[in-house]
Image (tube, helix red, strand yellow):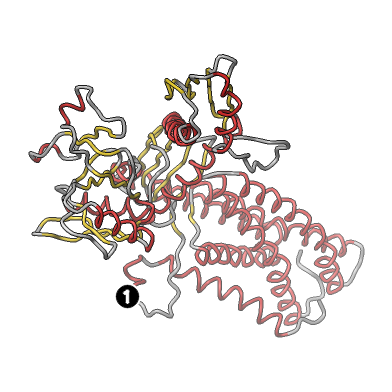
Amino acid sequence: MRYLAPWRVALVFGVVLLGLIASLPNLFDRKTLERLPDWVPKRQIVLGLDLQGGSHLLLEVDVDALVRERLENLVADIRSVLRPARIGYRGLGVRGDSVTFTLTDPAQRELALGKIREIDPPLQTVGFTGIQREFDVEIDEKGRAVIRLSDAGYQKLVDSAVTQSLEVVRRRIDELGTREPTIQRQGEARILVQVPGERDPGRIKRLLGRTARLTFHLVDLSVSPEEALAGRLPPDAMVLPAANPERGGPRYWVVKRKVELSGEHLVDAQVTFQNGQPVVSFRFDSTGARIFADITRNHVGELFAIVLDDRVISAPRIREPILGGSGIIEGGFTVETANELAILLRAGALPAPLHVVEERSVGPELGADSVRAGKIASVLALVLVALFMLGYYGLFGFFADLALLANLVLIVGALSLLEATLTLPGIAGIVLTIGMAVDSNVIIFERIREELRRGMPPLSAIDTGFREALRAVIDANLTTLIAGLVLFQFGTGPVKGFAVTLSIGILTTLFTAVTFTRILVWSWYTRTRPATVPL
């Protein structure tokens, strides 16, 4: 305390100055900042959904559809392994939550079981011992087979679908150009989506409510849609509705079940115009381009159906081989619907439909009220704490108030540099930090008082007070910091916002109480050399 190196003083005030510079962009709107030179700091605190309004959606993955699709794929896999092995069966299909069939020769039971195990390899499941498989397979002595998803297989299927859905939802939301959306898993199969500033929740629902599964199929012209609907459908074909039947085209199409090419090979999709009408142009990766070229080369003159979410958008005739790996989707689009389709295709397909469980729209007026209430609470807390410190500790209370202002500047600066999302609970964390910030100074000042009562000289009492109180200050703030980190790790939404501001506030409190206040007291004492300490 008897001497503080100038570089330490410069470093402390430099950090506070940087915090002030980082905080200044919050005083201007975004348009004003964009007109300033590039070297000017422009990062701002992002207001959360409850402060600036926006859309809140709670989505649920359609697990039943997911399971049924997996079982239907299993039916095709079983057919592909039993037929080459000359294993006879009948009644193969999905019934309820299982795949069932009956062997024509029960003596082939072990052989059939072995072939099914070939398409059901052991799962790599963390935390389980022994062999875990995706399916539970039972074939009785009479050849009746029942195949269901195992518990491990079900959990892996759901976890994989939710993880993939989270990524697809994030990409689709990011395409909107919104800032700081909250997208996170809740429970087993639910996804929380909060988009601050988005005034049209219907737009979000349109983007997220479609799986956007793009596939390409050859059209089966051996039977008309009417005949197929009447029951004369070939076993390798299916009937799909047209996406835009009102345009005068067919209401249904008969297409081959085999997926010739899937949308997973798409690398880009953009809105373009053809004959004055908006269309979606797409481009495949190298593998997709090669497959697309082979299909168009081998099926010149045939109709090629473009299917999106089990609806035929268009079925153009292949007039010549397409070797460039690109094509066009026509479907009577408007510019808006074409752009939404392009976004969906670029973002990728959802593994299963998403259903809206909960929907809320927060208006900007409510957000403005929250911001106003938060400002009033923060200013009131600051004023009351500052007055208390001045009244109780006098000059030293004034030093604590200056440290408190520096603390707030550092908190706002840190949140701005991180472009953190500030929510109403986050404001509560700041208000709480205001009270906690002076608590460290109270510990230090009370220790100085104790040393003065023991008859210690002023300079020694001040030096001992700061040094000996340091352990208590660090312990008190460290325990709170641990709680804040736990809240951040395991909390969601508002709880996490509270934890962020609280944790940053604790770190800045430690900095200002231990260094900034100490420098202020040292500067005062070296300039005035008082005989007594006004504490």
Given the current orientation, which residue lies at the most extreme bottom position? 6
In the rendered view, tell whether residue 125 sits above or below residue 139. below
Residue occupied by mark 1:
35
**Left/right of residue 58 with respect to residue 293 in the rendered view:** right
Task: State the image coordinates of residue 317 (x, y, percent, origin top left).
Answer: 16, 50
Give coordinates of residue 368: x percent, y percent: 37, 49
Q: Residues within 10 Å of mark 1 (few under 14, many from 20)?
A: few
Q: Within the image, what quadrant is residue 436 found in?
A: bottom right
In front: 412, or 445?
A: 412
Horizontal relation, residue 145 to residue 505: left or right: left
Quarter holding the C terminus is bottom right
Q: Decide: is 31 above or below 316.
A: below
For the point 37% across and 53% down, the residue is: 347
User: In this orientation, which residue lies closer to the viewer: 349 or 13?
Assistant: 349
Residue at image position (47%, 40%) is 191
Residue at image point 82% right, 80% down: 2
Could you tell me which quadrant the N terminus lies in? bottom right
